[in-house]
Image (cartoon, rainbow, N blue to C red):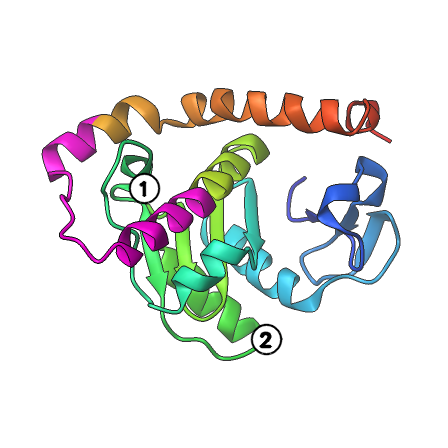
Amino acid sequence: MGNSLTFSSLGKHFGMLKASDMVHVNEEGQVIGGNKVAVNTAGFMIHSAIHKARPDINAACHAHSPAGKAWSTFGKPVDIINQDSCTFFGIQRVYKSFGGVVLEAEEGERLAEALGKEGRVAILQNHGLLTAGGTVDEAAYLFTSLERTCEVQLLVDAANHPKNIIGDKEAEYTARVNADPETLYFEFQGDLEYEIWKSGGELSKGE
């Protein structure tokens, strides 16, 4: 929508969000449409900076999910140890400068800078996960996949046994086959269909 953004509304559980709950704001964070409720300032600072720095990004997901939050404490990327984690080969970044709740534009700008020109996922140390894509579906699939990958990584590390890391050549090939935007969009459709089914059809109404 040009220089405007659409956010989930503050105080609404992710599992209960509907289209009518979304808030439409301009580039200054002022509500201009949608559900006219308070906007999460930290969320605006992060997302607006990313969209300004990366015009190719149309959607970004950020949350403090359990496995992602746990893995983020190490301040390092996930290892490329299975086919699923190959999705993140070459596109994952780590943002190590935790400065508390993001309430200043400069912090959001530093985070966007850490994502760089090619990054699509970021592990925010002591914070959580962030993913981005050309579509909501792509960004959402990357987020759910990264969360599961963090969970698997924690289980593998807890086994305290030497790991076999997939080679760069094999990882790059797998990422090229499985992680292009169109494939990631398609991969999310099963998850979306499941969520619609769980909601009893509420999510498909667009209200």
Residue 178 on image: x %, y %: 33, 24
Circle 2 residue = 101
Query: Which quarter of the figure is the C terminus placed in?
Result: top right
Q: Does the magenta stretch include residue 167?
A: yes
Residue pictured at 49% horizontal, 43% vertical: 143
Viewer-closest of 11 and 109: 11
What is the quadrant of the N terminus in the image? top right
Mark 1 or mark 2, which is nearer the start of the sequence?
1
Q: Which residue is drawn at 31% across and 39% down?
A: 85
Q: Is residue 205 in view from this perspective?
A: yes
Find disc 1 in the rendering and name its residue: 88
On the image, the x and y values in percent for residue 36 come to: 88, 54
Q: Please identify the dominant SS of the magenta region.
A: helix
Which residue: 82% across, 24% down?
200
What residue range appears in magenta? 146-173
Q: Quadrant of residue 136?
A: top right
